[in-house]
Image (spheres, rainbow, N blue to C red):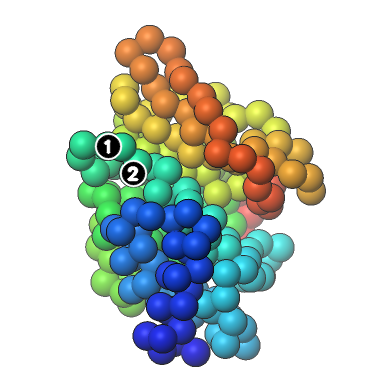
């Protein structure tokens, strides 16, 4: 279930779906997704599908993780040095980002998920990932500004605190739309004056909720 052949098949599917950044494909091949899900589901770890991780949350479909990561990196002369992730979840997206950027700052509102993610990321020796149990809708202002922000849950409207934490030239990738419905994956880029937004198409994510819980 964790063989090189199984991972290679996943990468081939990602290529077929339009993921063409070799850096992203290499990391998707090497990241042990089976460590980020429950043991009972480990045999499905390298299927291109979202899977439950408990507490009403899911680990994102590998294609979505790859697509958001590729969108964050696309067309940049230099890799982002500081990236904020809203919604740590299992820690899988953080693990994919870690080899590709300087520092990852990830916020999770559910403490139990944050603690589990911390254990997994530490076991993998990913020392450039910093986790915080907090309300993701307010970001992590003390460590910004960020060259990139990834939001892994959907809000009807983008929390205003998040684009404000982008550095000039920074890029935010986030799904927007109603809970339980089809949302739109957006890229928001901060310019010297104002922001520029464009769409990557339809997606479905769990809702972005305010507040924290144990």
Does residue 30 appear to the left or right of 151 in the view shown? left
Instruction: Return the residue nearer the eye: 53 or 80.
Output: 80
Q: Secondary structure at mark 2?
A: helix
Local crowd at mark 2 within 10 Å, few (<14), some, or many (≥20)?
Answer: some
Say if 37 sits above or below 117 in the image. Answer: below
Q: Secondary structure at mark 1?
A: loop
Q: Position of residue 83 (x, y in %)?
A: 35, 43
Q: Position of residue 175 (x, y in %)?
A: 60, 41
Location of residue 176 (image quadrant): top right
Identify the mark at residue 29; answer none if there is no mark: none
Quarter of the image with the C terminus is bottom right
Say if 212 sits above or below 155 in the image. Answer: below
Q: Tell me how far mark 2 sits from mark 1, CA to CA.
A: 6 Å
Instruction: Return the residue nearer the eye: 46 or 114.
Output: 46
Q: Position of residue 89 (x, y in %)?
A: 54, 60
Give the labeled residue for mark 2. 73
Q: Residue at x 33, y 65 (%)?
A: 27
Residue 166 in sight from this viewpoint: yes
Identify the mark at residue 76; answer none if there is no mark: 1
Q: Residue at x 47, y 48 (%)?
A: 68
């Amino acid at each position: 279930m964790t063989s090189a052949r199984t991972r290679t098949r996943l990468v081939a599917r990602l290529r077929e779906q339009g993921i063409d950044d070799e850096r992203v494909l290499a990391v998707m091949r090497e990241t042990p997704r089976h460590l980020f899900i429950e043991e009972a589901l480990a045999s499905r770890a390298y299927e291109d599908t979202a899977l439950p991780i408990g507490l009403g949350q899911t680990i994102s479909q590998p294609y979505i993780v790859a697509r958001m990561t590729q969108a964050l990196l696309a067309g940049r002369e230099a890799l982002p040095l500081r990236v904020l992730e809203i919604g740590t979840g299992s820690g899988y997206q953080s693990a994919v980002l870690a080899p590709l950027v300087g520092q990852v700052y990830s916020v999770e509102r559910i403490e139990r998920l944050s603690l589990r993610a911390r254990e997994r990321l530490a076991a993998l020796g990913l020392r450039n990932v910093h986790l915080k149990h907090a309300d993701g809708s307010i970001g992590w202002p003390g460590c910004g500004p960020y060259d990139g922000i990834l939001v892994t849950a959907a809000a009807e409207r983008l929390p205003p605190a998040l684009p404000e934490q982008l550095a000039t030239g920074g890029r935010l990738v986030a799904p927007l739309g109603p809970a339980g419905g089809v949302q739109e994956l957006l890229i928001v880029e901060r310019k010297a004056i104002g922001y520029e937004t464009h769409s990557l198409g339809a997606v479905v994510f769990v809702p972005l909720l305010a507040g924290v819980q144990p």
